[in-house]
Amino acid sequence: MHGMKPTATRLVQSLLLVAGLFAASIFALSQGAFSIQWSGILDNQTSHHAVFWSIRLPRALLTILVGASLGVCGAAMQGLFRNPLADPSLIGISSGAALGASATIVFAQHLRTIIELPEAISLSLTPLMAFLVGLLVTLVLYQLSSQKGKTNIAILLLAGVAIQAITGAGIGLLTYLADNNELRDLTFWSMGSFNAANWTAVKITSLCVVPSLLLLLTQSKALNAFMIGEQNAFYLGIRVERTKRIIIILTALTIGIVVSVSGIIGFIGLVVPHLIRLLVGANHNFLLPFSALFGAILLLLADTLARTVIAPAELPIGIITALIGGPFFLYLLIKQRRQLLL
């Protein structure tokens, strides 16, 4: 693409990413323990129709939503903190949501013996509690890090570390109390899985996540200004404290919702913005939407691998993303260390 005008280059890159998402979606829909015949997906009398419309398609759509969310939130966090190692899980929202879900898995059965819950509430109890505890953690973090209308990023990060330690201890205790069936659920949920994806999850996630992502995309100008420092951003007319609050709250809400339907999926929010930055540079006008597209592509491919590598069994998707992200994180640490030593 050397020699092309910047606008034409961005257009070509956009089309390539959209084409990549389409190809990854077709690949994900066609792969699995059950081999789908495309000619049979419109015939509602066949198992191909049932598998495609009830299992594969909602799972692919939910994976796209989660991947896009993690990509955008990762790019927003790195821009806000001006730190290439920043990740949405840094502020403790993921671990808070994990604690809520873990408590539900362990105690829900006992609760049902005491109180007769409506079926709709019973089925959605785990994601609902994950979201509510994630939201509670967000409010606590915001209160701890805000003083006189200002948000202290350093205190926010330190509070996030403390929250992760507390929630980690809580999850450890719940793991100790869990029986064999609950332990299996806890393991899969804490390492991420789309095994329970359905149309209800897709609809609820879409209604909550899409508006948050669109609002985050509107913060690209502010994130570009933050790259030269908060004081300079203020001189450029950015309402710094208000913008920080908006980005933090939107990211926290989005991550809380995502974790509530997929469990904890690490490193996508770290890896995706870095790779996109190599492609389009640090301009958040392109970095945010491109991170959404590439996050969706990468998570679709990771989920397909998780479903097929030991089919008909299924690996937690967190194992796949950790294998991708762990070495990449070490590479970034080594790179940061070299820069500090120079």
Image (cartoon, rainbow, N blue to C red):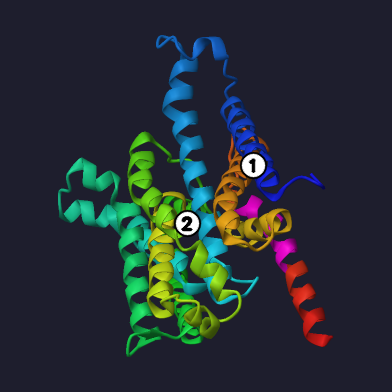
Up-down relation of residue 183 to residue 171 (above or below): above
Depth check: give the residue in front, 197 or 228: 228
Depth check: give the residue in front, 18 or 9: 9
Magenta: main secondary structure equals: helix
Image mark count: 2
What residue span does the magenta drawing correspond to? 318-329
Q: Please state if 243 lies on the left or on the right of 33 as rendered.
A: left
Q: Please state if 301 lies on the left or on the right of 234 as rendered.
A: right
Toward the bottom, the furthest residue is 148
Which class describes the residues within 10 Å of circle 2: few (<14), some (14-19), or many (20+)? many
Question: Element at badge 1?
Answer: helix
Which x, y percent locates residue 296? 56, 45
For label 1, the residue is 11
Any part of residue 131 in sight? yes
Question: Element at badge 2?
Answer: helix
Q: Is residue 319 magenta?
A: yes
Q: Is residue 149 magenta?
A: no
Up-down relation of residue 19 to residue 322 (above or below): above
Which x, y percent locates residue 54? 41, 27
Depth check: give the residue in front, 239 or 40: 239
Q: Does label 2 or label 1 sit earlier along the sequence?
A: 1
Any part of residue 265 in sight? no
Quarter containing the N terminus: top right
Q: Amino acid at mark 1?
A: Leu
Q: Residue at x 84, y 85 (%)?
A: 342
Q: Residue at x 44, y 33 (%)?
A: 58
Which x, y percent locates residue 100? 36, 63
Q: Amino acid at mark 2?
A: Leu
For label 2, the residue is 217
Toward the right, the furthest residue is 342
The reply to whether the C-beta atoms of the residues labelled 2 and 1 are less than 8 Å apart is: no
